[in-house]
Image (tube, helix red, strand yellow):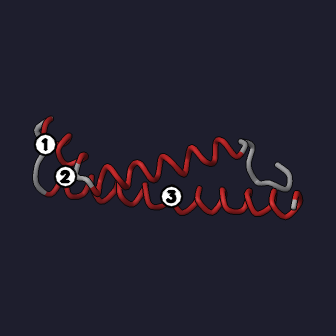
Amino acid sequence: MGHNHSSCGIFGVFLGFLTGVFWLVFVALHWVTILLGAIGLTGFLVTVINFLIALIGLLAFLIFGLCVFKKAWHLCKHHC
């Protein structure tokens, strides 16, 4: 794979970062709960699904955010 450890460019990494942000916002605003309630799910199952979506969103936010930072740092270091 080479030095960058990624086959996709900065745009793909940034989209991953934004996806994580959107999932966290959806959970924080209870949109996931509302959607799951609209299809008939309630109780503990909704809590577990909310937790999993929040966890995946947080991990995507952190991992892709770190990749965005590293790519931006690398570009800035070589161009500045």
Which three-letter amino acid code belongs to the residue tagged 2?
Val
Q: Which amino acid type is marked by label 1?
A: Gly
Q: Residue at x 73, y 58 (%)?
A: 72
Q: Residue furthest front?
A: 80
Sequence-wise, which precedes: disc 3 or disc 1? 1
Number of other residues with Cα within 10 Å of mark 1, as a class: few under 14, some 14 to 19, many 20 or more: few
User: Dot 3 surroundings within 10 Å: few (below 14), some, or many (20 or more)?
Assistant: many
In the rendered image, residue 42, in percent from the top left (x then y), is placed at: 11, 49
Residue type, mark 3 in image:
Phe
Q: Circle 2 is placed at which residue position?
A: 46
Which type of secondary structure does the marked residue at label 1 adopt?
helix
Q: Position of residue 29 (x, y in %)?
A: 25, 53
Q: Are marks 2 and 1 in contact (CB under 8 Å)?
A: yes
Residue that carries the numbered disc 1 in the rendered image:
37
Residue 61 has which mark? 3
Snapshot quadrant of residue 28: bottom left
Residue 22: where, in percent of width, then height?
A: 41, 48
Quick one: quadrant of the C terminus? bottom right
Say what secondary structure mark 2 lies in. Answer: helix
Q: Position of residue 43 (x, y in %)?
A: 10, 54
